[in-house]
Image (spheres, rainbow, N blue to C red):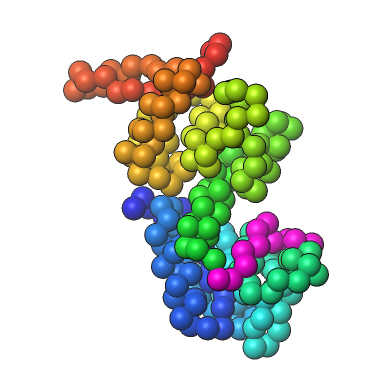
Amino acid sequence: MSAARFRVVVVDDDFRVARLHTRIVEGVDGFVVAGAAGTVAEARELVESVQPDLVLADIYLPDGSGLDLVRAIDVDAIVLSAAVTASAVRRAFQRGAFAYLVKPFADEELAEQLRAYTRYRNLLDAQPELDQSTVDRARRVLHGAGGAGGGAPGARRSPTETAVLEALAASGTALSAPAIAERIGISRATAQRYLSSLAHEGQLAIELQYGATGRPEHRYRTAGPR
């Protein structure tokens, strides 16, 4: 696993659920759990102490609502809750959560949301000032919608294909498979497989970079004019 880039606080009053969510988070490249809390009060103290990038918050907590916590902290948040009422979901988004997963959910659903968060942050952090197209791409990436251009009209790409294309678009330069793997939180072998497939479709161009060993490294960029 790559070095942790994003620190996460898990908030759930059931320690077994908190442990499960911790395992899922730490199974995604680039993430580490900085701490877990079982109440709103504990969560606020922990957030103040460790300054996380992301909070995973349950709604029903012994001393209050996780939605109030999300509203009070200046931290990105995902709500993980068994609450299925329209009002709960609306309040979660109104108070700043960017995703809402209904318990119980598959491990991969949370893992994919975390990978989407990585792609979102990569897009926003790649340059000091953003144009409208980058803002729109970041929003789509965060919510798992629409991909980068290319392909037949109406064609739908997998989340990983979209992530690869978005990472290259954000970079603006040719990247190797290991660099792509690091940016979007997948293995090098998986990155290489998707890059080769997209290059075969004509979506990517391949460049050769010669290093000290004399062996060329394949680097990929979006197809089209430089």
Vertical placement of residue 141 versus 59, above or below: above
Magenta-drawn segment? 93-104
Q: Residue at x 55, y 35 (%)?
A: 157
- In front of the other: 133 or 4: 133
Inspect the magenta stretch and tell me whether residue 103 lies in it: yes
Residue shown at the point (74%, 32%) measured from the top left: 132
Left of 37 or right of it: where is 5? Answer: left
Report x, y in % for residue 84.
71, 71
User: Is residue 172 something that shows in the picture?
Assistant: yes
Is 130 situated above or below 144? above
Q: How many marks?
A: 0
Percent position (x, y) of residue 127? 60, 35
Q: Position of residue 10 (x, y in %)?
A: 53, 71
Residue occupying the point 54% across, 66% down: 105
Q: Residue furthest top?
A: 225
**Does the magenta run of residues contain 100?**
yes
| Residue 75 shows in this picture | no
Of all residues, the one furthest to the left in this rendering is 213
The image shows residue 77 at horizontal and vertical percentages of 63, 62
In the displayed structure, 114 sits above or below 221; it is below
Residue at 64% of width from left, 74% of height from top?
82
For the C terminus, the quadrant is top right
Residue 190 location, quadrant:
top left
Q: Say above or below: 218 vs 76.
A: above
